[in-house]
Amino acid sequence: MPIQIMLGDITEVDADAWVNAANPSLLGGSGVDGAIHKAAGGELVNACYMFKELQPGIRCPPGIARITPGFKARVKWIIHTVGPVWHGGNKGEAETLANCYRNSFQLAQQHNVQSIVFPAISCGVYGFPWAQAAEIALREAKVEVAARKDQLKVTFCCFAEEIYKIYRAAHEIA
Ligand code: APR
């Protein structure tokens, strides 16, 4: 199956690339961001510093993605994307989240990534409603899998049972 949903810790999943749910500084944080930085080691934050600041403290605006090596992590690449903070749904949150997936997939293709693992971007401290986030994630993954001529494997790694069930349901509907 080109698209899989799993329950677990992304840093234990083998793939060519993980996607990190980062913040605009790209310098690490809590949640999955903290786990990925811990797995990759201190070289990752040094690599992230190298991205040009577009405004003070902003190396990656919401919806955009950047790529670094995986360093000590078990993946070759880490794609960092910044999800939208949920402000009620009228601030372009859905489109920004879709752009996170589209821009991550674009970098994946440019770097010959054949297997990619996503966390539930924006579904933690950024507060995006889970069902809508899952629908967007699955929709964009299906578009990408259909568009790519090679065999891309996309995994959504959910950290807790409740969100895992929601992603599973979205997969069946999409
Ligand atoms: N593996 C997989 N998923 C994880 C892991 C992990 N090790 N740790 C947390 N998660 C899950 C959370 O349970 C949530 O479902 O990832 C999802 C995204 O949650 P957050 O990490 O809070 O990401 P997000 O909502 O996009 O907020 C981004 O959090 O830490 C900061 O620097 C980050 O400021 C940014 C913000």
Image: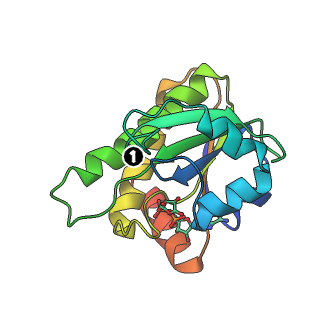
At label 1, the amino acid type is Arg
Q: Which residue is mark 1?
A: 139
Towards the viewer: 27 or 30: 27
Looking at this view, name the residue that lies furthest to the front: 56
Task: Kindly identify the residue that appears in the image at 44 percent across and 70 percent down.
Answer: 125
Image coordinates for residue 21, horizontal then vertical, percent = 53, 54
The image quadrant in which ligand 1 is located: bottom right
Image coordinates for residue 61, horizontal then vertical, percent = 38, 41
Quadrant position of residue 36: bottom right
Describe residue 146's horizontal placement relative to residue 91 as left or right: right
Task: Kindly identify the residue that appears in the image at 54 percent across and 46 percent down.
Answer: 26
Looking at this view, name the residue that lies furthest to the left: 90
Task: Rate crowding at label 1 as few (under 14), some (14 to 19) or many (20 or more) other CA atoms within 10 Å.
Answer: some
Quadrant position of residue 131: bottom left
In this orientation, does residue 139 appear? yes
Towards the viewer: 13 or 28: 28
